[in-house]
Image (spheres, rainbow, N blue to C red):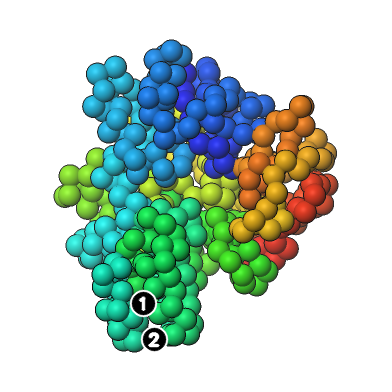
Amino acid sequence: MTILLLGSGGREHAFAWKMIQSPLCDKLFVAPGNAGTASIANNVDISPTDFDAVKALVLQEKVEMVVVGPEDPLVKGIFDFFKNDIDLKDIPVIGPSKLGATLEGSKEFAKEFLMKHNIPTAAYDSFTAETVEKGCDFLETLQPPYVLKADGLAAGKGVLIIHDLAEAKEELRNMLVGQKFGEASSKVVIEEFLDGIELSCFVLTDGKSYKILPTAKDYKRIGEGDTGLNTGGMGAVSPVPYVDAVLMEKIETRIVKPTIEGFQKDGIEYKGFVFIGLINVKNEPIVIEYNVRMGDPETEVVVPRMKSDLVELFLAVANEKLDEFELEIDERSATTIVVVSGGYPEDFEKGKVISGLETIEDSIVFHAGTKLDNGNVVSNGGRVLTVTSFGDNFEEAIKKSYQNIDKLHFDKMYFRKDIGNDLK
């Protein structure tokens, strides 16, 4: 098969790394890709949201399957674009329909879906610039800390957790009236704060049946001890050590099953990943949010643990035969540490030459924000590389990742040194 993978991050490099191991994958294109995917596949300089350019490439190269990495093309309706195009309708797209992608595209839509299907989630209300003062009144009814979420896509940075009521009101006005996150915060969801431990549950569905993938926990804050600004993710561990069979059974019966059944009841066409962000409150799983694709950096620990053929798995999704697929998982722990540009998630410089990549042993380096420049691999984003390792337990895996990060260098390189400490 000739396959096209859309995206350019660490998640996409991990997908590409796994897909080219399949005997079914003859040729892999990645649009736009990064320096890591360039070394194993064919990068094409096309934006994943330029659907006409994607169509031209698919027809020119006789692409037989499209795998969508990031959320933007899904929210913009790439699945529907293929389905409704006479030349493309028979080419499977791994990713949900535009309606399905609204679960990530709109926090309000997701909350309404959760409530409608009796899936446990935090109490909430949503507000616009016109109702900003009502939102301030609603904040007064809640206990601190206060959770403010931009309704639209804000690249993982549109959630604020604030302890002071006056500051929460000020930030609500900043988001709604001052457009802090632009169009994404033209509507804001205010939610009650849940105190517990977060984890990510990943599900792959063909719309009827599903497979639960390995659990993972990521670390969102830039600073050690989970301090500072939110990022796209600074590291991840899989499996999550405290998730036992009892908790997993609750997650499946109370959350996963009603979610997939909800798609069918609501007529939502969904062939792809469901990322369920959960919080474990006194051993009761509660949904924080849905994403409609794999997480990043969680993909860099979940995909390496999958022993099964990823292309075969995607074909089972496309053909609605997922119930016949046997998913094999590596029992070992996997961890990944994200190496970022100094200054991220605020202002940072690009174009820093990365050295030491060829010295890495017993770990896998997945490229995120990198590109090739005159034969050098250089930084090209906030999150630059992720270093993934296996171990009999997560401590052993983390130790390997840190040992290998010591061999890497670029100017102003930064990484958290405390990933996994909270699990010990």
- Image position of 138 (left or right of 179): left
Residue 313 in picture, x, y percent from top left? 42, 33
Between 379 and 97, the one nearer to me in the picture: 379
Q: Residue at (37%, 24%) from the top-left corner?
A: 52
Query: Which numbered circle lies on residue 143?
Result: 2
Query: Which numbered circle lies on residue 192?
Result: 1
Q: Is residue 248 visible?
A: no
Q: Is residue 205 above or below residue 45?
A: below
Amino acid tagged 2: Gln
Residue 122 sits in quarter = bottom left
Query: Which numbered circle lies on residue 176?
Result: none
Residue 233 in picture, x, y percent from top left? 57, 56
Cα–Cα gap, marks 1 and 2: 8 Å
Disc nearer the start of the sequence (1/2): 2
Residue 401 in picture, x, y percent from top left? 73, 51
- Image position of 36 (left or right of 408): left
Q: Residue at (40%, 18%) from the top-left corner?
A: 56
Q: How many marks?
A: 2
Quarter occupied by the C terminus: bottom right
Q: Residue at (57%, 32%) from the top-left corner?
A: 33
Residue 19 in picture, x, y percent from top left? 53, 29
Is label 1 in contact with label 2 (beta carbons under 8 Å)?
yes
Helix, strand or loop at label 2? It is loop
Q: Residue at (47%, 74%) from the top-left corner?
A: 161
Q: Is residue 189 above or below residue 96?
A: below
Q: Residues within 10 Å of mark 1 (few under 14, many from 20)?
A: some
Q: Is residue 135 visible?
A: yes
Amino acid tagged 1: Glu
Residue extending farthest to the front is 178
Helix, strand or loop at label 1? It is loop
- Image position of 86 (left or right of 327): left
